[in-house]
Amino acid sequence: MVRRIQHSVTSGVICMVGIWILYLSFTQEPSEAFLFPRLVSIIFVLLALWTFIKACLGRSKVGTGLNYNDFMQLLPGLLVSIVYVFWLAKFLGFYAALFLCSFTLLVLYDPASHHLFRSWIKRLVITSCFTAVMYILFYELLQVYTPKGYLF
């Protein structure tokens, strides 16, 4: 019973976030710039609703849920993501903020030693490649509007 409630609440919160994103994607202007987010958010909401219904019916078969220690390990990444979505992408620009947040997440979660110069170079290369791929994907291929900021 506790597991069903935990899964229902978690999937319900995710579903609500998806509905909020779906609403934003249909109400923002210029509407052409939000075509890709609309498509993604529709799929996201459908999957979230399906998961929520399964959780409410007790048919969710996804382990024991999230315990306190796991949540505390995820919390720094969650906070970085929240700062990115609600502030940094609008202030610095999508790609500069993406670079900064990706690098921060790598520093937080990469098990490689923080004392080795080589591990810092690896993190910078991975972050640079990831940002370049996102640029090519969103700007060049999908031609998606991304937030502009002070840097680019």
Image: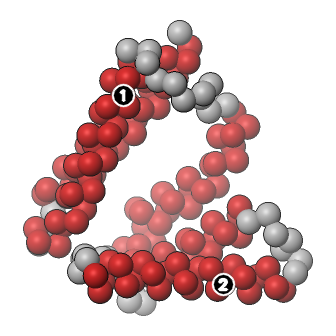
For disc 1, the marked residue is 52
Give the side of residue 112 with respect to residue 22, left or right.
Answer: right
Residue 81 lies, in percent from the top left, at 51, 60
Q: Earlier in the sequence, mark 1 or mark 2?
A: 1
Residue 89 in the image, given as x and y percentages of width and height: 41, 73
122 or 89: nearer the viewer = 122
- State left or right for residue 48 relative to residue 8: left
Label 2 residue SS: helix
- Which quadrant of the view contains residue 71? top right
Q: Which mark is residue 124?
A: 2
Residue 64 to residue 127: above or below: above
Instruction: Identify the residue at image location x=28%, y=82%.
Output: 141
Going by the image, does 39 lie left or right of 64? Answer: left
Q: Residue furthest bottom?
A: 151
* Residue 116 falls left or right of residue 88: right
Q: Label 2 amino acid?
A: Leu
In which quarter of the view is residue 129 placed? bottom right
User: Dot 1: few (<14), some (14–19), or many (≥20) neighbours within 10 Å?
Assistant: many
The Cα atoms of the two marked residues, 1 and 2, are separated by 38 Å
Is the residue under label 2 in contact with that under label 1 (CB below 8 Å)?
no
Q: Quadrant of the C terminus?
A: bottom left
Residue 149 or residue 95, whichever sits in front = 95
Q: Is residue 131 above or below residue 20?
A: below
In the image, what residue type sits under mark 1?
A: Phe
Residue at position x 70%, y 47% in the image: 73
How many numbered marks does the figure carry?
A: 2
Q: Position of residue 21 (x, y in %)?
A: 27, 51
Residue 97, image x, y percentages: 48, 77
